[in-house]
Amino acid sequence: MVVDSRWQQELETPTEAFFRAFADRVAAADGVRDAVREAVKALVPRIDWEAYQPHVPHGILGLRAVLRLRPLLQEQSFLRALAIQLHMAAHEGRRSAAALSQVAEAKGSGTWRNLEAFIQSRRPALAYAEAQGFEPPEAGDFQRLGQLTELDMANIGHKAVVADHLGDLHDRLDHPKATGRRLFGLAAWVAASPEDTFWARRAAKRLGATAVGVSWNPPSMAAAALEPQVREFCDLGLVAVLDQFTERMKAGQGAGDTLAALVLAASEKQLDARRDLEGKTAWTFVYLATLARTRPTDPRIWCQAAALVNLFPTDEPEDRVRPLSMAVPDPEALRNAVLDLEPALAMGHADGLARAGRGEETLAALAEAATQNDPTFNHAHHFFCVAAAADLLPHLPSFAQEAMLTALAKSLANSQGSGDLGRLADRALSAKVQQ
């Protein structure tokens, strides 16, 4: 891998030439992979993660979502999405020069004993340094980190998502050593940040000492049979939700039906989301997709998911936007409806396509629309939620797929922002092609 000095310079100090440098970098052999590797390696130590607490900036984290969406996108759209996501990462708050020097030189012994101790004692800087000593981190290391944090719902579940997404990003970049240490270090840093085990402790109290494992089996219940559970998630308070949910776990309800019920309820919550809460509400799908990918059997983790869905407000059904009936639903019309901020029209096309068994086409249209939106505007939630839907789709019965895709069409159409950065990226990419 030969590092492009102009790209490296733009990562360190971004200027108006950022997109031109990106276009040149990705035009080389393995350019996409190497551009992302170099960005992660340069930016992870430079971003001032402490300043964002309790939140996590989404520039680096969102790279996994963009790469996950690549099969659904035209190549030009994918490159645009990657360019603006990297631009977002490059413009996140930076450490001081003195702090950067300390981080750049930090390297521990690379042992799990030390790393676990730093996570348990909440010392993120030491956890990051210890992670730099792993030579190199492997997929199992990210998974183990995720297991250490799976009962910690700080910042509504970011720790589990960070471990899962950064591990997957490491895989998609073909396991580079130096970049892998940066990703593992970031995941360790987030894992060691302040914890929140409130929901897990409430779940454990209700589950008692009974050994209950959640079996991973396909969904089998019909929509009507799941509706009482959806009503519990949407209409009850947290105490009642956990009471009812833990009883279902004790009775042996499996992951397939539980995930379907949670997605149905999350979709209803998304329909009720105010414009300023569209992105935050869509995060629920991201957390649920991580459960679908990591396949936990601990019922406390599923109780956390139930509490997360319940957290967001529910409105009266008559106040919701209703999908228009479409005689001929069309993916291109769906994309245009999202970009034209017409939620009812977008929902109609998404619902019609999904009911016709064209879920992949629906996802592709939503993904294309997401690339037209500057991720800085909404913390990359458009990329996150569509990638989450792609992860969830194979695990859901058709009626849950339809509800999720229709809700996301509404969400995207209701939360479009500026596409100026995407147009600048397109201009740079087009100029490169013409050379």
Image: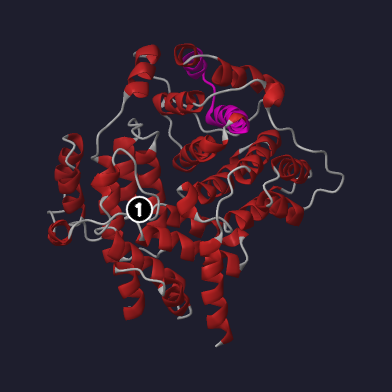
Residue 20 falls inside the magenta stretch: no
Residue 174 in which image quadrant: bottom left
Note whether 152 is above or below 233 in the view shown: below
On screen, residue 21 above or below 377: below
Quadrant where the image shows the C terminus: bottom right
Residue ID at (50%, 17%): 245
Q: What is the x, y in percent for residue 318? A: 71, 22
Which residue was labeled with disc 1?
139
Which residue of the protein is positioned furthest toward the right in this rendering?
327
In this picture the colour scheme is: secondary structure
Whether residue 51 is visible here, answered yes or no, is yes
Q: Give the side of residue 129 with respect to residue 245, left or right.
A: left
Find residue 416 and report its horizontal and vertical position in percent. 59, 49
**Which is the main secondary structure of the residues drawn in magenta?**
helix
Q: Which residue is drawn at 20% across and 57% down?
A: 132
In the image, taking residue 271 as reference, residue 214 lies left or right, namely left
The image shows residue 261 at horizontal and vertical percentages of 59, 27
Residue 46 falls left or right of residue 174: left
| Front-lying residue, 117 or 37 | 37
Location of the N terminus by quadrant is bottom left
Which SS class for mark 1?
helix
Q: x and y percent of residue 3 in the render?
A: 32, 78
Outermost residue to the bottom: 435
**Label 1 packing within 10 angstroms: few (<14), some (14-19), many (20+):** some
Give the residue at x 50% y 23%. Answer: 310
Q: Quadrant of residue 202?
A: top left
| Amino acid type, label 1 | Ala
* 30 shown above or below 100: below
| Residue 188 seen in the current view | no
**Toward the viewer: 407 or 318?**
318
Magenta segment: 244-271
Whether residue 76 sits left or right of residue 21 in the image: it is: right
